[in-house]
Amino acid sequence: MKTTAPPTALRRPWQETFAALQHPNYRLWFAGQLVSLVGTWMQSTAQGYLVYDLTKSPAFLGYVGFASGLPSWLFTLYGGVIADRVPRRTMLIITQTTMMLLAFLLAGLVFLDKIQAWQIVLIAFFLGIANAFDAPARQAFVVELVDREDLTNAIALNSTMFNSAIVVGPAVAGAVYAALGPAWCFAVNGLSFIAVIIALALMRLPPMAIQQKSRSTVHAIKEGIKYAYNERMTRTLILNMGVISLFGVSMMTLIPAWAVSVLGGDVRTNGLLLSARGLGALIGALMIAWLSHRGIRGKLWTAGSLVLPITMIAFSLARWLPVSMLILVFTGWSFMVQVNTSNALVQSKVPDELRGRVMSVFTLIFFGGMPLGSLWVGSMASRLGAPMTVVINAVILIAFAGFVLLRLPFIRRLK
């Protein structure tokens, strides 16, 4: 059940920043997801370091990233059709429960001292399948929780929640891993899913207008792809998500190896680097939430597209942990500004009856680029070293940003 929020003109600055939290269903969603995401980032951080500890191979980090992202290519578009045909809350409860069980399985293998690198790859693949169905439903679910005028703010607060977890989760994971071992990081993640499942169950939602299955699944998928391709703004923003995923986000795959081989640190160093990136992304998400009614999303997007590659080059040159962390704060900010504004701009235009399918295309290109990017950076880092790999990726991002600025200037004017 939605509630009517105060008109934008009557809101105080803090009310504008946290406008979506005035809706009871969104408050439940925010609280449950925040707890769950802290656990998720604890597992992700511990898993990456555990893989590197078992294999000593940057390339194997890429294999795990590829395995977790491959299901995006196989199932995300179908997941978008399902998200338009069944209640999204039901779909989310199923996917979140699946992720919980996989986390407990991983914890059990480590507790029993039976864990092997290939098992982590296999679990990552099944987790990727759950994510392929979860992500389109989660993206489209927000519109059921708030009024239209607060949709951009809700998307920004989703990112705030996500990145608050990135700040806390990796740092906690580093401490827990060092003191108790990786199994406890995975066990805590499994327990954290209970919070979001309870939150989903407690929501009072109006009946969802379920799309009738009058046409084939293939036809429904084509409709979503056709809309995303024909709308110039949507096409450009989704393409950019793919470029960022391939050449920007993929650098984070190297962080466990970077912490050890470049900075001479350990698992705590790995957690601190990831938390620094998360802090910057959190700042970016809060900024967008605060500015969500200012009509400057195109300008923010443009700034982020230029700052991201510049900070990547600076990071490749840094060899002192505090400086590396500071640079990653700006990297996280620029990354979040682009992803968040792209999400909000696409969602603000897409028709409700196509929302799940169009967001599945968005999710496919973004998350689907990650496994390819992981293979790319893992393989290149094994040959050229991690710093040179990051520089090459940054140059590609600069070239793409320049193309958009020169050939597609309408992006800068988007409100």
Image (tube, rainbow, N blue to C red):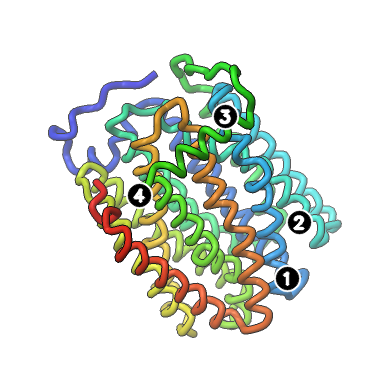
The residue singled out by tag 2 in the image is 120
Quarter of the image containing the N terminus?
A: top left
Residue at image coords 49%, 61%: 243
Residue at image coords 66%, 63%: 48
Disc 1 marks a residue whose amino acid type is: Asp
Q: CA distance from mark 1 to mark 3?
A: 44 Å
Image quarter of residue 28: top left
Disc 4 marks a residue whose amino acid type is: Thr
Q: CA distance from mark 1 to mark 2?
A: 13 Å
Callout 1 secondary element: helix
| Dot placed on the residue nearer the N-terminal end, 4 or 1 | 1
Q: CA distance from mark 4 to mark 1?
A: 37 Å
Q: Is residue 292 left or right of residue 188?
A: left
The residue singled out by tag 1 in the image is 53
Q: Is residue 147 above or below residue 358?
A: above
Q: Count residues near mark 3 (Cα–Cα under 10 Å), then give few for <14, some for 14-19, many for 20+.
A: many
Q: CA distance from mark 2 to mark 3?
A: 34 Å
Disc 3 marks a residue whose amino acid type is: Ala
